[in-house]
Image (cartoon, grey):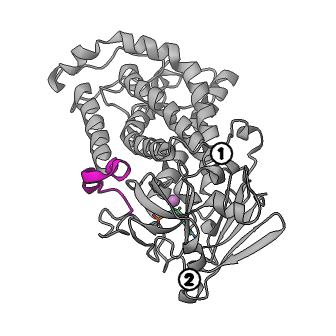
Amino acid sequence: MPWHVSWRGRGRPRPRVRSPWRSPIRGPWLTSVLGLVLLFGLPLLFLTGLLSYAAYNPDLSSWNDKTPGKGLLGFYLFAWPTRPYWLYRVNQGVHVTLGIVLVPVLLAKLWSVVPKLFELPPVRSLGHALDRLSLLLLVGGGLFEFLTGLLNVQLDYIFPGSFYSLHFYGAWVFFGALLAHVTLRFPRMLRALRSRDFRAELRTPTSRTKPEPPDDGGLVPSRPAEPTMSRRGALGLVGLGSLTLLVVTAGQSIGGPLRETALLAPRGRNPGSGPNGFQINKSAASAQIRAEDVGEAWRLTVEGHGRRVTLTLAQLQRLAQHRSALPIACVEGWSTQDQAWEGVRLRDLARLVGYDADPPGVFVESVQRTGSFRAVALRDNQVGDPRSLLALRVNGARLSYDHGYPARIIVPGAPGVLNTKWVRHLSFGATT
Ligand SMILES: Nc1nc2c(c(=O)[nH]1)N[C@H]1C(S)=C(S)[C@@H](COP(=O)(O)O)O[C@H]1N2
Ligand SMILES: [Mo]
């Protein structure tokens, strides 16, 4: 029963305050069309998010994630593969782009059910209470996930070290509530979708736009206002919003000439030219790298098997040099084209301390003194991959300071954050 004709309390019926929500296009059909888009989009967002989290090797070290194990929710964690080498790039491009593109749909969906959100009385029965609770978690969880995601993408890691945990736990709350919501509403959604012909709706102008028949969910207004927009117009507006966001975002992940259209991309569209002219996440200055730490006095220490080897840059350069064409792909969704890295294989460095076959994982430390990305643990499959390098050069030139001079990690298929810059220490077999 719509709330404006329900009665509160016992005894004399008392008409309730009239609903202020009067849009004639609000109703189960419009809500269901938007719901259907989210029904496809949100599970893909959830899945790519879970994969993205697994890609950090969070269970390897509290350096990779502050709350590594994740308990029950970590049931699915697995050893992130190194092939295909573009795996993280595609996964995260889809995750971030899809998340941004769904924003107009999410907002429109919220608008379409807004009378429900302010429904009175807030709770009518136990079943109703559970339904309301799932809605609260759904709306709250959804807003939380979209906001933390967008803030992280736009504002350069404003949640130092804890973004993953916030976004990860939030995702489970949101998805749990979504499952409950879909279970409860699916039949109603199908009925509503069948109640109107989609194509006929796309041919209906504002002048012929009529409210839907009264619904038991209370979305259709009892005193509809004159239409100012058709359902076609509303869906078109949402679609145009999503399309615009797609155009100004996707280029940061796809690259090439499309990078120029990525107006929303926080990581400068024009990262300069020359061999080191590709996106920089954190510059040497902002990571407070001191000149003396990466100058003549710089040494690489390699440890493992109870052995310790110290190398100068010149000594590193004399070890066998190998090439790998690999991108940098950040959790924020931006990525670079493949860059031609050159340096020493991680498994060759493991061999220096005696791991002749099947090298273990490695704990990597940077000269950087503060910040959560100054150290990271890599898994054995990443160390063992012949394309994984301690890179000294890129695109035929010495690494620039901003890209990690004198030496940085580059691993195929991995999130950018595992590619530690300004490396000074490698401990093989010391990842936990
Ligand atoms: N020491 C150190 N290494 C680091 C980081 C950092 O902050 N400090 N940022 C990481 C992140 S999040 C990314 S995406 C890549 C970016 O590499 P680039 O700046 O060369 O593109 O470096 C990684 N390596
Ligand atoms: Mo990153």
From the viewer's perspective, tell me whether residue 339 is left or right of residue 122. left
Figure quadrant of residue 174: top right
**Mark 2 sits on what residue?**
294
Task: For marks 2 and 1, give the one nearer the viewer.
Answer: 2
Q: Secondary structure at mark 1?
A: helix
| Residue 222 position (above or below residue 70) | above
Whether residue 253 is in magenta: the answer is: yes
Q: Which mark is residue 125?
A: none
Report x, y in % for residue 108.
37, 36
How dense is the environment of label 2, judged by Cα within 10 Å: few (below 14), some, or many (20 and up)? Answer: many
Q: Amino acid at mark 2?
A: Val
**Mark 1 sits on what residue?**
169
Report x, y in % for residue 251.
32, 50
The front one of 125 and 399 is 399
Please provide the residue range marked out in magenta. Answer: 249-267
Disc 2 from disc 1: Cα separation: 38 Å
Placement of the C terminus among the 4 image quadrants:
bottom right
Q: Amino acid at mark 1?
A: Tyr
Q: Secondary structure at mark 2?
A: loop
Of the two numbered discs 2 and 1 on the same chain, state the one appearing first in sequence.
1
Report x, y in % for residue 237.
26, 37
Residue at the image point whose x is 49% and y is 25% from the top: 3
Residue at the image point whose x is 30% and y is 36% from the top: 238
